[in-house]
């Protein structure tokens, strides 16, 4: 009789197929609890000063604002989900992963600089890159570059208001910052979450 196949190979394949271990996100965390407490205190202060009408007026205005923002949030989340399915994991991991070195930080910086749209686009895209194999360093470089160098705000707001000279010098001075932030993020992440040793090394 032949021996049954070993069950140890299945978890190994599953573990290798996962792009990143990551911790499960809790639906209610400390940030949610703190924000809820601040909202409760704010409601009590407004109610004490303006009464029920003041509270209802603020709630009505915020519901209208939420209704206008919700489609953008939904579109951004859908964009991130589709990008995480479309992008090839191996190529992203090779170009923006932990072993990409300085080139990965430069690619993340360049991608953030040309990324259009506001936060409803940038952050879902950054989350999608993390899901398909990009490391913290390259993703931090992308977000910082989008914040500091993003051409959309420069063309639409900064050049018309502040002038071309100011905008160009501001961009030139900001160029190294995304790379430095990404390198620091990569350095800190590796030490906070060290990679577990491979099974081959243990044997």
Image (cartoon, rainbow, N blue to C red):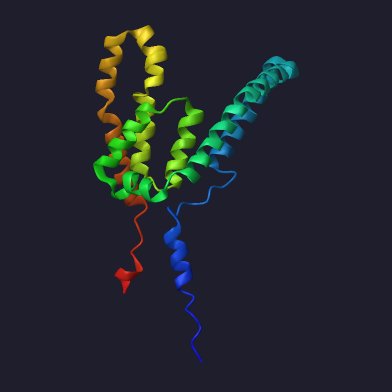
Task: Classify residue 186 by image quadrant.
Answer: top left
Q: Quadrant of residue 51?
A: top right
Q: How many marks do you count on the picture?
A: 0
Q: Is residue 169 above or below residue 21?
A: above
The image shows residue 162, relative to residue 105, as above or below, that is above
Q: Position of residue 191 (x, y in %)?
A: 32, 51
Q: Residue at the location (54% across, 32% down)? A: 76
Q: Is residue 131 left or right of residue 72?
A: left
Q: Relative to residue 190, is residue 34 drawn left or right? A: right
Is 144 or 96 nearer to us in this picture? 96
Specify whether 41 is left or right of 146.
Answer: right
Q: From the top left corner, tell me how far across and down residue 163 is, in percent.
A: 32, 8
Which quarter of the rendered picture does the C terminus lie within? bottom left
Q: Residue at x 48, y 43 (%)?
A: 86
Foreground residue, 188 or 139?
Answer: 139
Could you tell me residue 9's position as x and y percent? Answer: 45, 72
């Amino acid at each position: 009789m032949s021996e049954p196949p070993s069950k140890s190979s299945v978890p190994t394949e599953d573990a290798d197929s996962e792009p990143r271990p990551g911790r499960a996100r809790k639906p209610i965390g400390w940030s949610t609890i703190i924000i809820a407490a601040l909202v409760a205190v704010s409601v009590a202060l407004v109610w004490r000063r303006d009464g029920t009408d003041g509270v209802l007026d603020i709630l009505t205005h915020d519901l209208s604002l939420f209704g206008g923002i919700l489609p953008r949030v939904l579109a951004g989340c859908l964009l991130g989900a589709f990008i995480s399915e479309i992008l090839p994991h191996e190529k992203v991991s090779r170009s923006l992963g932990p072993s990409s070195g300085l080139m990965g930080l430069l690619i993340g910086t360049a991608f953030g600089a040309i990324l259009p749209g506001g936060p409803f686009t940038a952050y879902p895209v950054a989350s999608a890159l993390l899901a398909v194999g990009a490391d913290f360093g390259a993703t931090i470089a992308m977000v910082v570059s989008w914040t500091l160098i993003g051409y959309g705000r420069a063309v639409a707001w900064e050049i018309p208001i502040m002038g071309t000279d100011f905008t160009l010098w501001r961009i030139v001075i900001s160029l190294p910052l995304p790379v430095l932030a990404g390198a620091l993020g990569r350095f800190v992440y590796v030490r906070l979450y060290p990679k577990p040793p491979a099974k081959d090394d243990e044997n």
